[in-house]
Amino acid sequence: MTATTTQQALGERAGGVAERLSARPRRFLPPRLGRRYERRFALVAFLVPSLVYVGLFVAYPLYRDIVISFQNYGFSALAAGHGPFVGLANYRQMLNDGTTIRAIANTVVFTLASVAAQFVIGFAMAVYLNRQFAGSAFLRRIILVPWVMPLVVTGTIFSLIFASTNGLANEVLHGIGLVHKPIGWLTSGDLAVLSIVVTNVWAGIPFNAILLFSGLQDVPPEQLEAASVDGASPWQRFTRVTVPMMRPVIMIVLMLGVVYTLKVFDIVIVLTNGGPANESQLMSSWAYTQAFSDFQLGTGTAVANILLVFSLLCGVVYVLLSRGDNTGRARR
Amino acid sequence: MPIDKIPAAHGKRRAASILSAAAMLVVSGGLTTVGVSVAGQGVASGAPVGTVVKAAGASCPGGVLKLTEEDYYGAPSKTNPSANGMKAFFGNYSKTHPCVQVVRQGEVVTGDAAYLTHILSQFSSGSQPDLLMLDNPQLPQFAADNLLVPLQSLGALPVVKKINPANVEETTYNGKLYALPLDTNTIAIFYNKALLAENGIKTLPKTWSQFAADAKKTAHGSDLGFVFSGQAGPGQATWQFDPWAWSNGASTTRPDSPAAVQALSFLTGLVKDGAAPKSVVNWTQTQPIQEFEAGKAAFCENGLWNIPTLESAYPKLKWGVFEIPTRLAGQTVIAPFGGEVWSVPKTNAKEEKAAFQLLKAMSQNINAFARDVAGVPTEPSLWKASPWNESVYQPFLAELQHGRSRQAGITKPANEPAIDLDIGNAIEAALVGKQSPAAALQAAQSQVAPLLK
C-alpha cells in the first residue's frame, strides 16, 4: 500500500466514524443545537478521558515537581503541604555538591555502558535465536525470565553474588585461582558502579534480544538470498542488509534502553544503597536519598528534574534521528 | 506559620467526610433493606454500619467515635509478634469501650522513610491519625513543627513518675512531654558459644584490644568474626558506632573529638585487619543478625529485640550476650536508647481526649506491652520480673542504666536525624578507606557544626 492509499483509507475510516456519529444527532443534544455542535461534543467527549488522565497523572505531578524544586521543602513543608520559595537555591546547592556531580557521572557511565552491552549481547542472542534448531522455541521463551523478574529480586540475587564476604563471584574466582583475596565488589566505589552495570545488563538483555529478534524476522529472506547470490559474505549480509533493514527497530530499542536505564533505581538501592559513602549514587537514587532519607524534597526534586532534562534531550535526539530516517526512506 | 492552617484544613475535610458518610449511610441503608429482605439478618457484613452507629448512639453521646492509630509494625502474622500484640490490644480496647472504635493502620506502610513521608502527607491533608507511633529520634521534629499535643495538657499521667527519667527526657521538648516511651531497647554484643570454644576463647573480652584479638581469632575460612552495621542511615551506622565512641568519652556534638576518632579508628582497624568483614559497609542491622543466626559470625553487635526470635526460632544456636567492650578496662558503657514512642497528633478536642485515654490504657500494663513489641519496659522496677530477669537481658539492662538519648546535648534536637546521617557518611568513608577516620570525622564536624547552632 502506498502512502497515498493509506492516507485515503485512514481518511475514509475517520470520515466514516464522524458520519456514523453525526447520523444520530438526537441522541446527544436537542435537535435545535444542530449537527456542528453535535460533532464538537463528540470530539470533546472522546478527548476528555485522555485529557483528564494526562492532567491528573502527568501534568499535575510534573507541575508540583517543578514548583517544589523552587521551594525550601523540608520536614515542615511536607507537614504543611507547601514551603517558602527559594528561587534556584536548590539547583545551585545540588550542582555545588560533589555527590551530585559524581551521581551525574555515574549515571552517564551506567547508561552508556548498560545500553551498549545489553544491545550488543541482545543482538547476538537475537541472531542466534533466529535460526531454527532443536529447542530454539523453548530457548526464546526462557530467555525472558530475567526480564519478568522484579528488579528488587534481581538486585537481591546479585547482592549475594557480589558480596565481598562469602559472595558467589569471589568464591568462584578464588576457586579457579584467579584471585587470592576477596574483591570488594560492593565496598569500593568504582567496582560498585561496575557491579550495578553488570546486574542491569543481565536484567536488560532479554528486552533487547526479543525486540531485535522480532525485527530480524521482518528482514525479507529474498534480499538476504539476493545478497548471497551476489557474493556477499555472512558478515557483509549482516552489516549491509540486516542492520540497515532493522534501523527503525534498532532506534526504538536504543531509545527505550536509554530511557529505561536512566531511571533505574531499584538495583542501586538494593545492591549498594548508593554507597559506600555515596560513591555509587545514580541520579535516581540520589534524588530519592535527598527527598526521602534526608527529607529535602526541594533538592531531591531538583536532582530529579536534572534527570528529566536528560531524558527529554534523549527524546529530542530520537525525534531528530527518526526524522532523518524518514527522509532517507523517501529518497530511496 | 502554615501549620496554623492544619485545623482549618481538617475542619474542611471533616465536612467533606460527613457529607460522604451521609452518602454512605443512604447507600448502606439501601443495602440493609436488601440484606434483610434476602437473608433475613441485619447484623452481618458492611451494611449494618449505620445500624451499629444508631444502636450505640443511644448509649454513646454523639455515636461511636472512630480513632485511627498508626504504627510501622506491619501486618499481624506468626512471625510478627509486635503486630499481633497491637492488633489484640486495640481489638480488646474497642470491645471494652463500646463508644470507641480503634482502627489500626499499622499495616499500611513499613520502613523509616516511607513511614515518615506517609505520616507527613497525612498531616498536610488533615488526615493525620489520632494516635501516632514514632521512632524516638523523630519525635522532636514533630514537636518542633507543632504537630503534636503536649500530653499533660490533656490530663494527668501518673505513669510518668515510674518511667526512667532518661527516657522521659527524650520525649520532652521545650519542657513539655510530647510522647510516652513505653518500651526501650539498646545494643550489645551477641556471641556464638560454639565458635568461641572452637577458637579457644575462654573469657569474654572486656577491652577493645581483647575484643580485636578474639574477633581476629574467629575470622577464618567462611567464619566472619565480628559483624555490625556500617551503612549510613537512621538506626544504622551511627547508632551502632555511638556506644563505642560514647563509652570512650565522645559525644554526638563533637564528632571529631579525639575520643570519637579513636573509636572509629578501632572499628576501621577491625575491618582492615579482617577481624570484621568488608561487607559491613553495605549492611544495615538486618544482615549482621542473619549471619549470626546462620552461625557464621562469632560476634554480632545488635539489639535486644532479637532475643525472642533467637530463643524461639534458633534452638540449636548456643549464644550469649556481653556489654560493648571499652577502650580501657573499667570505663562505663554508655549506649543509646532505642524504641518507639507514642504521641497524640493535633486533631480536635474530642479525638485528642479519646486518644489520650487510649494511650493511658496502653501505659497501664507496660510489662505486657514491652513484651509484645520485643522491647524492655521503660519502668526499671519491672526489670526484676520474667523475662527481663533472664541472663541474656542483663548486659542490655546494665547498659540501659547508663543509657543516653541520641538527642542529648543537641540544642535543636530536631536536627538529630541530619547529624546522624552526616556521621554515618563519615563512618562509611572511613570503613572503605576513602578517608582516614580523623579526616572523615573532621568533614562530619564541619557539616554538623551549623546544625548545632
Image (cartoon, coloured by chain):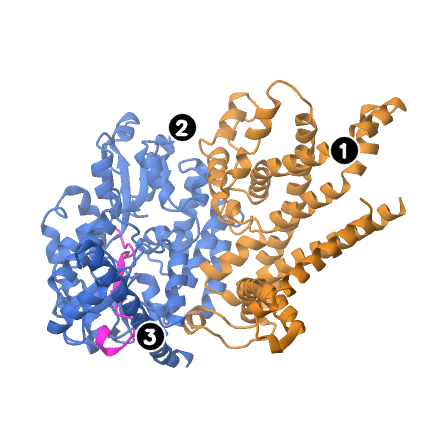
Chain colours: A orange, B blue
Distance from the alpha carbon under mark 2 to that under mark 1: 53 Å
Say which quarter of the image contains residue A122: top right
Name the residue: 63% across, 35% down. A210
| Nearer the observer, B129 or A5 | A5
Q: Is residue B76 above or below residue B173?
A: above
- Part of the protein shown in magenta: B331-352
Q: Name the residue carrying label 3.
A: B19
Q: Position of residue A313 (x, y in %)?
A: 70, 57
Q: Chain of mark 3?
A: B
Q: Chain of mark 1?
A: A
Distance from the alpha carbon under mark 2 to that under mark 3: 64 Å
Dominant secondary structure of the residues highlighted in magenta in the image: loop
Say which quarter of the image contains residue B154: bottom left
Q: Name the residue carrying label 1.
A: A219
Q: Position of residue A141 (x, y in %)?
A: 56, 30
Q: In this rendering, would B396 be left or right of B293? A: left
Name the residue: 37% across, 64% down. B119
Q: Name the residue carrying label 2.
A: B222
Mark nearest the camera among 2 and 3 is: 3
Name the residue: 88% across, 22% down. A229
Distance from the alpha carbon under mark 1 to that under mark 3: 63 Å
